[in-house]
Amino acid sequence: VMESFVQKEEFYSSYHIKILRPKQPMSDEVMHFYCYALRSNNWKYSFGRQANKTIDDLEIPSLEKIPSWVRNFKYPRKINNTKKDNVKISLDFKKWKFFNLGKLNNDYYLFDISASKDGLIQDYDIGTKPYISSTSYDNGVVKFVEGKTTNKKGSLTINRGGSVGEVFYQDQDYLSTPVDVRILTPKDKLSIYVGMFLCTILRLEKYRFNYSRKMGTARLKRLKIKLPNKKDSNTPNFEFMEKYIKSLKYSAELAKFN
């Protein structure tokens, strides 16, 4: 509910969709800003409370109130298509193998799984270090605090409670709630591209869990996820994962600007 997109071409639409046509010309940047403003209202709705009649009464910034940086920002219009990463890569799921998320036996596993040893968010003053909680927004960051970071960048955070199963790649050292977030520390160093690939795969497991069946440490350790593996090997093909995410990044840019 409340997902919003800018449509650049003529299109068909199904039901449960409202079409918003600008009453005066708007740049792509301004329309994307309005998409963000609309998405920020999604907390008001759910499957049982849809955005039908009330959507017309939502308040969003007027054109005069849009920040100047939105109008001044311009998307890049040129794509460098000479890079080796600019190759479309397909997925062959049938050849993927299951890997243990956590350590259960002597088999290969992906992460050491633990709870943070940091204090609760109310224990910290406002500062500059990201504090991760069990939200589904802003990469899990709910506040910037003053304190010593105990969790290292390059790890994943996954929600045990709250927005159960939401997972993020953390690209800087951080603090985290010890209650409803679990830290996935990789056995092998992960680039941000591999991290994004793994986050996507892990989000596919969200349907197994809910508020009353939390994604706790024991269940995470027993979880197996299917990944591309190296040929004739029982280890994940991280190189393929990185190339695939980079190819998506390029394809998205190409589709947007060509």
Image (cartoon, rainbow, N blue to C red):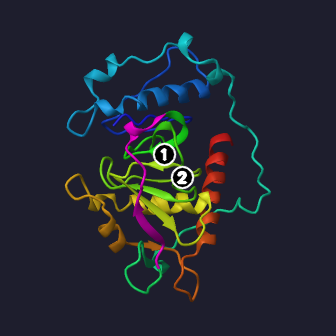
Residue lying farthest to the top in this orientation: 64
| Vertical comparison of 248 with 223: above or below | above
Q: Is residue 84 visible?
A: yes
At which x and y percent is residue 125? 47, 33
The label shown at residue 170 is 2
Find the distance from the CA under tag 1 to the CA under tag 2.
8 Å
Tell me which numbered mark, 1 or 2, is placed earlier along the sequence: 1
| Vertical comparison of 135 with 100: above or below | above
| 215 to the left or right of 244 | left
| Vertical comparison of 45 with 61: above or below | below
At horizontal 30% and vertical 51% (from top left) the residue drawn is 161
| Helix, strand or loop status at disc 1 | helix
**Residues rendered magenta in the picture:** 109-125
Q: Is residue 245 visible?
A: no
Count of numbered tags: 2
At which x and y percent is residue 199? 47, 58
At which x and y percent is residue 141? 47, 42
Observer-nearest residue: 166 or 90? Answer: 166
Observer-nearest residue: 215 or 8? Answer: 215
The label shown at residue 21 is none
Residues marked 1 and 2 touching at CB (< 8 Å): yes
The label shown at residue 139 is 1
Q: Amino acid at mark 1?
A: Asn
At horizontal 42% and vertical 66% (from top left) the residue drawn is 113
Is 249 in the magenta?
A: no
Residue 16 found in image quarter: top left
Q: Quadrant of the C terminus?
A: top right
